Image (tube, rainbow, N blue to C red):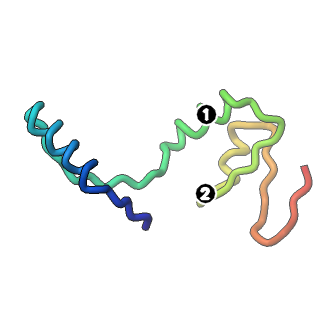
Amino acid sequence: MMQVVIERSDWEWVQQALATTNGRIVHAHTSGHALSSDVVAFTRAVNGKTVIPIHTVKPENFCGYFNNVTLATDGHPSEF
């Protein structure tokens, strides 16, 4: 996990901005993973020559949305 270091002057600025606006800090965890529908929409928008799904549990599902999918296997070179 990456740790962000905030200098004291930056933190004082944040505290002042929060006090001025009656704001508050809320801890919220996010996974960083996109919805599959968003991934498909983004991939369509990019309109790349080849789609190579990575970091996904079921890369073969992309074949149902695109005709230009190349499925890669970890540790093996792919040609496209």
Question: Circle 1 sits in a helix, a strand or a loop, which is it?
Answer: helix
Where in the figure is residue 39, as x and y percent of width and height? 58, 40
Q: Nearer the viewer, mark 2 or mark 1?
A: 1
Q: Residue furthest bottom?
A: 75
Where in the figure is residue 5, as x and y percent of width and height? 35, 60
Locate the N terminus and report the quarter of the image it occupies.
bottom left
- Judging by the rendered image, the residue that carries numbered circle 1 is 42
67 in relation to 4, above or below = above
Q: How many marks?
A: 2
Q: Which mark is residue 56?
A: 2
Question: Residue 1 versus residue 70: which sits nearer the camera?
Answer: 1
43 in relation to 60, above or below = above
- Residue at point 68%, 45% (across, down): 62
How dense is the environment of label 2, judged by Cα within 10 Å: few (below 14), some, or many (20 and up)?
few
Amino acid, disc 1? Phe
- Residue at point 48%, 51% (across, down): 33
Q: Which mark is residue 4?
A: none
74 in relation to 23, above or below = below
Nearer the N terminus, badge 2 or badge 1? 1
Question: Residue 24 versus residue 64: which sits nearer the camera?
Answer: 24
Residue 47: name its quadrant: top right
- Residue at point 17%, 47% (across, down): 25
Residue 68: name its quadrant: top right
Question: Residue 56 versus residue 9: which sits nearer the camera?
Answer: 9
How dense is the environment of label 1, judged by Cα within 10 Å: few (below 14), some, or many (20 and up)?
few
Q: Residue furthest right?
A: 79
Q: Is residue 31 left or right of residue 50?
A: left
Q: CA distance from mark 2 to mark 1?
A: 15 Å
Q: Residue furthest front?
A: 9
Amino acid, disc 2? Thr
Where in the figure is residue 15, as x and y percent of width and height? 15, 45
